[in-house]
């Protein structure tokens, strides 16, 4: 680890420097390609698959199910019955009315599947098929929740842009941060779509967390950039931004590792031990989001900001002078 | 040191508040769980329909949206509401709902303002009436009216208070009307343009009311509060305060102006009735024309019923009335194994965080761990205190949030290391690093808090629950870093181990490449290094006048020339 702290020292003094700002064309190209892929590929796969909470589905109610020896009802019987017909299904099962019925909810089914699952459930719980009723259920995550959430999102983004512009005293940081945010959200959603996982409320909650995290991470790094780019430095604007990113690089790495460790272990257990479900959905969205959110601050938000500012006449003129001064100093002409 | 005491006080207060809950209100030291982990109650609502009436999908969706807002407003989090079949609504909420909650969900809350045309005490079998009156034992829902009586007004009524509304047929119906039938009637609704016969909530007064003048749709906002007298002192009586929208305000002004004219001439028609779901909840006299559109409804409200009505009015009336068809317990959809797995995964993740912190920050890593433990404890207490119901997603969110909280410590430690690299002594590096770090932490947490606040205010359902969690963890982050991590570091900086930068302290100035001054010591803290001076002068430069700045630039140019 000594080498890691040495690495941090070198980044701080500028002895070692990774040229994030200078090579921005590479990063921007990568970003555009990734965003495009994140939009196009899910569409080629047939769009997003929405879970029962969004699209509604079918519901079975088994009345008077057979109980186990201890008088309880085995919920896994229902799960097995459904997966025997539809191997990929993840039914929601609950016991209703203190054990007098089992409720099973699945994605919207074809009539033939409905009959098959009804028979399988009747067999599993040792009741006649008449005791299993079916019905359609609407979305628990209704259009009203989505609409209100989107309204809130738009208001948040506008206010966040204003708050950042006021705090940093430049709207250009807001724009750079929002572009990075857009990048993060599109890619997180894109990976979700590419993997073909069902979009569930847990995934949406993860997605909203990323919304906050992406901007949060950008603000931390931008605050260092703000400190480094106040007037009176001998570096050009781009160099100051780059130094700030390098000086906060150790923090960026440490933070993302520390954030990713718990998310990663929940994802691992969620995906490989439990299979599809709440834990996998939320941790996957978070895992991708934290990775991309940290990456985009360094490789997109900061270089973008430098690009925006370099267009300004004042910055350009002062950069020219400083470059000239550096050339003179290194040539030893002024002594 | 004061900060640590402050933190202890906060923790003790939270723990004490919860202890009180456990003792007196059936609280618990374990957080309540949401529907997916613990189950709850499944209420199936069926619409009350006249024969031949059908429900459209739009009406059902609208009803779901309104019921969701009502439940959100009652503070029940993580409820699930959806449609079932073509006309039922299923509401699943954790725990067992009380009657007030059921009423809040199912009643339509259709509010109408109608002027009073006739009012009298109801002539039903009452105390002292020895005769066995058949109609009171089995109230007839629809009083029979002599079909020969005229049902059309003799003259076209000019306004809603016109006595011509009371046709002979209506008067006959009024005389036959039995207030107790209101409870058995499914709905007591007359078309908005027609007069209505009804009674008040308690069944002590019977009315003929004119057509609807203003309806609930014109309410912009409604709140509950206590009535204050003219001295501004609360009378302790609960009331619902209404704010009309622009149109409603104008109409209400016109109506009250007209009714006010009856103040001395006709005390009955001076009154207007506030009708909720067909029953008069209040029929006050009009003492003045109300032009600001902010009437107050007082009646026989309790604090709960006033809040329920205010919420119902705010979110609008249901397009239909519903009744509870079944009210059953429902088990968790996720087995307890899911929660255990989630907690186990979180624990493994946090152990990994501990290992990583120790590798990265050596002994300082223990400060991170202690801070995380404190953050976890305060979050836990807050979850208990605020009565959150934790869903599996919520548990995962909290675990992850604790990981992200660690960022504040990392930002802070890195700033201290930066100051050490600039050659400061540890105690001064801690102070200087803190000044910069807290700025960054507050700015970045402000963004998270903004997200939490806006989502909480505007969103509904699960998103609202998420916003609350985000807000709580953000506040905990700031509390812990300011009241725990920073004071602990101030204390540690005075110890020999940290102060002299032991290689295992994680704050070893030499390992951090601090500039060695060659006098067997680093530059004294008072002797601020050049780079620091530059930064502070830069800060100062921002506040200079133009003339000052120019002078300073000239000076800087001269010294720079000398240096090189």
Image (cartoon, coloured by chain):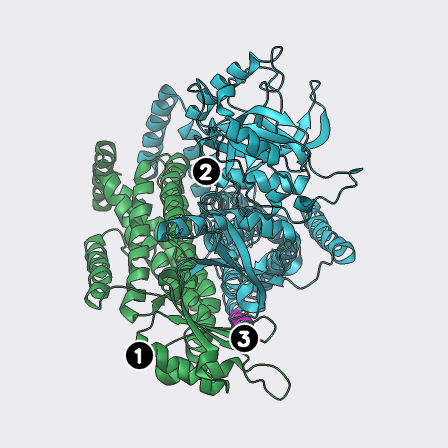
Q: Is residue A187 visible?
A: yes
As measured in the structure, the alpha-carbon distance from the residue carrying label 2 to the one carrying label 1 is 79 Å
Residue B329: give its label: none
Chain shown cyan: that is B
x and y percentages locating residue A299 in the rendered image: 29, 55
> Of tags 2 and 1, which is closer to the observer?
1
Residue A52 left/right relative to B18: left
Give me the C-alpha separation between circle 2 and circle 3.
75 Å
**Identity of the residue drawn at 52% across and 35% down:** B146
| B89 vs A136: above or below | above
Please tell me in which quadrant of the rendered image residue B40 appears.
bottom right
Q: Position of residue B340 (x, y in %)?
A: 56, 74
Q: Are the residues at dot 2 and dot 3 in contact (C-beta closer than 8 Å)?
A: no
Boundaries of the magenta span:
B341-349
The chain letter corresponding to green is A
Q: Main secondary structure of the magenta part?
A: helix
Q: Tell me residue B505's x, y (percent).
A: 58, 63
Residues under labels 3 and 1: Cα distance? 23 Å
| Placement of B556 over or under B138, stated as above or below | above
**Which residue position holds label 2?**
B533
For image coordinates 55% across by 79% down, the residue present is A64
């Amino acid at each position: 680890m000594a080498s890691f702290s040495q690495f941090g020292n070198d980044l701080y003094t500028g002895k070692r420097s990774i040229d994030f700002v200078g090579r921005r064309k590479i990063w921007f190209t990568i970003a555009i390609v990734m965003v495009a892929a994140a939009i196009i590929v899910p569409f080629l796969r047939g769009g997003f698959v929405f879970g029962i909470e969004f699209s509604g589905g079918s519901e079975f109610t088994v009345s008077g199910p057979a109980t186990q020896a201890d008088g309880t009802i085995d919920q896994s019987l229902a799960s097995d019955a459904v997966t025997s017909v539809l191997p990929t299904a993840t039914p929601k099962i609950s016991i209703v009315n203190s054990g007098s019925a089992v409720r099973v909810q699945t994605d919207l089914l074809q009539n033939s599947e409905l009959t098959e699952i009804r028979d399988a459930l009747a067999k599993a719980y040792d009741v006649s098929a008449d005791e299993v009723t079916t019905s359609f259920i609407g979305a628990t995550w209704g259009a009203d929740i989505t609409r209100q959430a989107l309204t809130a999102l738009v208001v948040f983004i506008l206010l966040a842009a204003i708050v950042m512009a006021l705090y940093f005293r430049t709207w250009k940081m807001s724009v750079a941060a929002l572009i990075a945010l857009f990048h993060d959200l599109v890619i997180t959603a894109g990976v979700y779509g590419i993997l073909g996982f069902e979009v569930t409320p847990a995934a949406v909650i993860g997605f909203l967390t990323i919304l906050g995290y992406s901007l949060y991470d950008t603000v931390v790094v931008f605050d260092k950039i703000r400190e480094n780019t106040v007037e009176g430095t001998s570096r050009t604007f781009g160099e100051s931004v780059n130094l700030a990113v390098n000086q906060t690089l150790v923090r960026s790495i440490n933070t993302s590792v520390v954030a990713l460790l718990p998310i990663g272990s929940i994802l691992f257990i969620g995906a490989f031990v439990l299979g599809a479900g709440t834990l996998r959905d939320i941790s996957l969205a978070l895992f991708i989001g934290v990775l991309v959110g940290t990456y985009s601050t360094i490789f997109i938000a900061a270089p973008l900001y430098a690009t925006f500012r370099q267009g300004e006449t004042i910055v350009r003129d002062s950069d020219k002078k400083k470059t000239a001064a550096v050339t003179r100093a290194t040539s030893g002409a002024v002594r | 040191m004061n900060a640590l005491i402050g933190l202890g006080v906060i923790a003790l207060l939270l723990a004490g508040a919860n202890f009180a809950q456990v003792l007196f209100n059936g609280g618990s030291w374990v957080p309540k769980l949401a529907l997916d982990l613990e189950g709850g109650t499944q209420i199936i609502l069926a619409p009350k329909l006249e024969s031949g009436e059908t429900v459209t999908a739009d009406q059902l969706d609208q009803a779901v949206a309104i019921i969701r807002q009502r439940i959100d407003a009652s503070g029940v989090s993580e409820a699930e509401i959806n449609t079932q079949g073509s006309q039922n609504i299923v509401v699943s909420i954790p725990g067992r709902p009380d009657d007030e909650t059921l009423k809040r969900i199912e009643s339509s809350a259709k509010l109408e303002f109608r002027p009073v045309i006739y009012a009298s005490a109801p002539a039903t079998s009452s105390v002292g009436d020895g005769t066995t009156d058949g109609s009171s034992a089995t109230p007839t829902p629809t009083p029979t009216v002599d079909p020969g009586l005229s049902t059309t007004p003799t003259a076209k009524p000019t306004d809603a208070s016109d006595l011509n509304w009371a046709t002979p047929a209506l008067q006959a119906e009024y005389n036959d009307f039995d207030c107790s039938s209101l409870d058995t009637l499914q709905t007591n609704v007359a078309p908005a343009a027609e007069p209505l016969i009804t009674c008040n909530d308690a069944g002590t007064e019977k009315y003929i009311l004119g057509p609807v003048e203003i309806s609930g749709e014109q309410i912009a906002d409604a709140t509950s509060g206590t009535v204050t007298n003219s001295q501004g002192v609360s009378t302790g009586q609960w009331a619902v305060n209404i704010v009309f929208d622009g149109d409603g305000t104008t109409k209400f002004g016109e109506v009250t102006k007209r009714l006010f004219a009856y103040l001395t001439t006709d005390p009955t028609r001076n009154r207007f009735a506030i009708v909720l779901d067909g029953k008069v909840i209040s029929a006050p006299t009009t003492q003045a024309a109300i032009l600001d559109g902010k009437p107050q409804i007082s009646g026989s409200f309790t604090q709960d019923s006033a809040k329920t009505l205010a919420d119902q009015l705010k979110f609008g009336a249901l397009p239909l009335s519903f009744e509870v068809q079944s009210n059953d317990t429902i088990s968790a959809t996720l087995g307890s194994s899911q929660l255990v797995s989630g907690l186990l995964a979180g624990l493994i993740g946090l152990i990994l965080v501990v290992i990583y912190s120790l590798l990265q920050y050596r002994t300082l890593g223990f400060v991170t761990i202690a801070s995380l433990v404190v953050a976890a404890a305060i979050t836990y207490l807050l979850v208990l205190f605020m009565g959150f119901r934790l869903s599996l997603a919520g548990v995962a969110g909290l675990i992850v949030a604790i990981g992200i909280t660690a960022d504040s410590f990392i930002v802070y430690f890195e700033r201290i290391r930066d100051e050490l690299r600039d050659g400061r002594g540890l105690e001064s590096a801690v102070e200087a690093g803190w000044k910069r770090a807290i700025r960054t932490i507050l700015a970045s947490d402000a963004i998270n808090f903004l997200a939490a606040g806006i989502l909480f205010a505007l969103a509904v359902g699960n998103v609202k629950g998420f916003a609350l969690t985000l807000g709580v963890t953000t506040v905990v982050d700031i509390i812990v870093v300011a009241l725990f991590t920073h004071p602990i570091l101030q204390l540690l900086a005075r110890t020999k181990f940290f102060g002299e930068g032991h290689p295992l302290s994680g704050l070893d100035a030499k390992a951090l490449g601090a500039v060695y001054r060659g006098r067997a010591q680093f530059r004294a803290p008072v002797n601020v290094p050049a780079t620091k001076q530059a930064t502070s002068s830069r800060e100062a430069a921002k506040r200079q006048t133009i003339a000052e700045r120019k002078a300073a630039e000239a000076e800087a140019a001269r010294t720079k020339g000398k240096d090189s």
